[in-house]
Image (cartoon, rainbow, N blue to C red):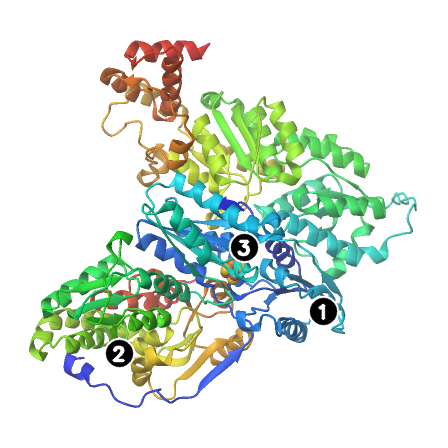
Amino acid sequence: MQLAVWTYEGPPHVGAMRVATAMERVHYVLHAPQGDTYADLLFTMIERREKRPPVTYTTFQARDLGSDTAELFRAALAEAQARFRPEAILVGASCTAELIQDDPGGLARTAGLDVPIVPLELPSYSKKENWGAAETFYQIVRAFAGPHAPPPGTERPARLADRRPRCNLLGPTALGFRHRDDVREITLLLARLGIDVHVVAPLGATPADIARLGEADFNVVLYPEIAGQAASWLARSFGQKATRTVPIGVGATRDFIAEVAALAGVDPVPVLDHETSRLPWYSRSVDSTYLTGKRVFVFGDATHAIAAARVAAEEMGFTVVGLGSYSRELAREVREAAKRHGVEALITDDYLAVEEAVAALQPELVLGTQMERHIAKKHGIPCAVISAPVHVQDFPARYSPVMGFEGANVLFDTLVHPLMMGLEEHLLAMFRDDFEFHDEAAPSHLGATAAAAPAASSPAVAAAAPVLEAAPVWAADAERELRKVPFFVRGKARRNTERYAAERGLAAITVETLYDAKAHYAR
Amino acid sequence: MTAAAALAPARGGCADAPVLRERGQREVFCGLTGIVWLHRKIQDAFFLIVGSRTCAHLMQSAAGVMIFAEPRFATAIIDERDLAGLADANAELDRVVQQLLARRPDIRLLFLVGSCPSEVIKLDLSRAAERLNRQFAPGVRVLNYSGSGIETTFTQGEDACLAALVPELPAADETPRLLVVGALAEVVEDQFRRLFAAMGIEAVDFLPPRRSTALPPVGPGTRMLLAQPWLGETARLLESRGATHLPAPFPLGAEGTTLWLHAAARAFGVTPARFRDATALAESRAVRALAAHRASLAGKRVFLFPDSQIEIPLARTLARELGMRLIEVGTPYLHRGHLGPELDLLPEGTRLAEGQHVERQLDRCRADRPDITVCGLGLANPLEAEGFTTKWSIELVFTPIQGYDQAGDLAALFARPLDRRTRLAV
Ligand code: SF4
């Protein structure tokens, strides 16, 4: 059993819903109790979809248990088929139905329906949402592309010289972080390279489109968490190579261009010579000097966390002080990335562990999910959202991809927005006692309501902080002096000073101790 | 409407009207969702759901957007290892509770809340509660109830929670005391307390209380008014402890509030003059507030999907005080005993539906083309996209709408979506 306040991922059947909802002409019959219908609101409210997810829930009740839950499933299946006439029906169980073992797959196979059935086995007590999405997508790809696979060992024929190279875009789903806009951005980028997009899947694909996947020359894996498994099956079955670079950030987009150009046999130079991102110049402009070395903590799904950390370090000039992910499936990749940034990776799906890490590191900026937004708000630290799970406000009306060159522009704005402007920060340091312009005011462009009052130390921090024997006491003048340190580094200054004093066995912290500690840690 | 008119409801209504009973997909929350308001109401209580990742995800999806402080609820997520053997699951639960209480030393009352998975694997939470009680008494009291979706629908979770509190209530004697049952916003509680005081009823308690250390007493002198229509089991247990139920419509709108207060007045021998003195001013304020919205709502056709069980009292208010026309009034469950006085007041011929087959109900809704549709969050945007004006039903549970001074707010909840339609030119 695991104590969870918030969860980064839903259960695996929600992953299956993300795939089903993204696709066209597919229906999902889910054996589940009534409360599980909450999942519809993720799509209709958070993503503001105009249609209900194509899901029929059996909504069995206690009185059905042990008697006719299987019959209920059969009836729901037949009704869904008659009403929606889909090209394919996915069937599966949520956590409760998994326990009653009605075997939806078996029931559906024997139901004699005139529609392809894709049975989903998604273990709810060991797996989570992204795994469920990946498995569902893989099963659908196998079911519909499988029959078109050449015999094993068949050499992939070379592309005819008069046909433009074409690829599939794999991984975008419903409820994905900026998936819709990423698809458009990458499609445009590929078009500039002279590469056609054959099928985008699952987003917008029908089962018939899935059947055509093997016709593309190669696959672009936009979201490895979701499409990795299907892409490696396509590689084995159709000899289709797949991209490994996720084009988030200017550097990664350049790498991606080189990678797809090689896969497609086209010349990347014309596109690389006419980059359309403003990020490189904006980052070099003098105003951005103040970004230098800002300490940033990054957490999210593996793809977005790794990418955001690279952008933060190489393209914004920040210092990555923490990098983590809830994607255990890609823990190895996150650890490798963390090593490059010289930090220890935090692989956890425990929100409290992430909060502890943030509290201990006292970063100046947090890049994370909606959970980290809560954490950062509580600790008075600026935050930008770079990964799912997200709230409704992270499905913006405007075009805002995070991939490709436009995505890099979006990221530059996203990462700078929560911070103080360069000169504003300096003025605060000089005149922090001005009654209107004090350092607990929010950045001026965020308005009064955004003022993030740093919360009193949270229970998590209180519980996590080591109990120091006879912790040093702050003298009143030292405490006053500490108030003069800008708030976004004050927490760190306090901790450093206390550690410095404790290590030296000092009973009291004076103004001198404060500056001694500052000098000590500045080395 | 005057108090006198309100006190003489026309008999008949929908008491014997046929009810459309449907079975199919139910698009409703499970009882766990009640925790969203209960954990804010009882300030030293914590709700530990013993369930799956689905349960945890439901809670954050239903509540996530509304909760900015750390919530006083969490989920002990059952995993594979727990399923391997029940002895382990119990030990694991004890460990999680220990971890939780160490983190939250402010907690005085801990609810272990059962879910579908905990019930299907027959994890005995009442035994677990007993065991943990021995361990943590007297600092923390541990109780249990089920909010599972196979047994409870949305607001029935509050019923199950309050029912679990009933055996804990101290005993009271024959002295008459009024007990108001059902979570209400604090502002509404305070208003009711003032109104009762003005009638001379001073001994008034509310269940649930704001703190678990201030549980109201119950006994043969207890006269109980239900503030919410979903408290069947709680009321039954209170009655078994000697309380007398005062049947009344629910306190929505001016008329409903007057009739509800009047049930208490009658039980406590308040004279008609004193009752009028106590309520007339607030009642006329409510009538004025409602009148302000009547112009935009009268004649509008409303369709209510089943959600919280507040649908029937709500429909009564919309029809009688705002002049709206009821197309269909759905409810997840119809408690005839408690809803009797409401059914008497509903316009004759109202189409009542109990249970749900969501696809067929949507077909009816599309065919009826109501002016406003009350429905859950999963249906609202898709219906809006089809051109229907909707009101999220969850707001009727999460916002204070009871009592005289909230009658206008209740009407505004319905007027706003219609107003919005007329403003938007895109
Ligand atoms: S319906 Fe059951 S399994 Fe689903 S969230 Fe509610 S209690 Fe949990």
Q: In the visual, does B60 lie left or right of A241?
A: left
Residue type highlighted by circle 2:
Pro
Percent position (x, y) of residue B30? 47, 63
Dot 3 or dot 2, earlier in sequence: 3
Q: Which residue in the protein does label 3 denote?
A: B54
Q: Residue at x 49, y 66 (%)?
A: B379
Residue positioned 44% across, 12% down in the render: A522
- The image quadrant of residue B344 is bottom left
Q: Residue at x 47, y 83 (%)?
A: B20
**Disc 3: which chain?**
B
> Separation of disc 1 and disc 2 at Cα?
48 Å
Side (left or right) of A229 relative to B376: right
Q: Is ligand 1 less than 8 Å from the beta carbon at label 3? A: yes
Q: Which residue is mark 2?
A: B247
Residue visible at 58% across and 50% down in the picture:
B82
Q: Which element type, helix, strand or loop, lies under badge 1?
A: helix
Mark carried by residue A107 = 1
Say which chain tag 2 marks: B
Q: CA distance from mark 3 to mark 2?
A: 38 Å
Which of pointers 3 and 2 indicates the residue nearer the eye? 2
| Whether label 1 touches label 2, CB < 8 Å | no
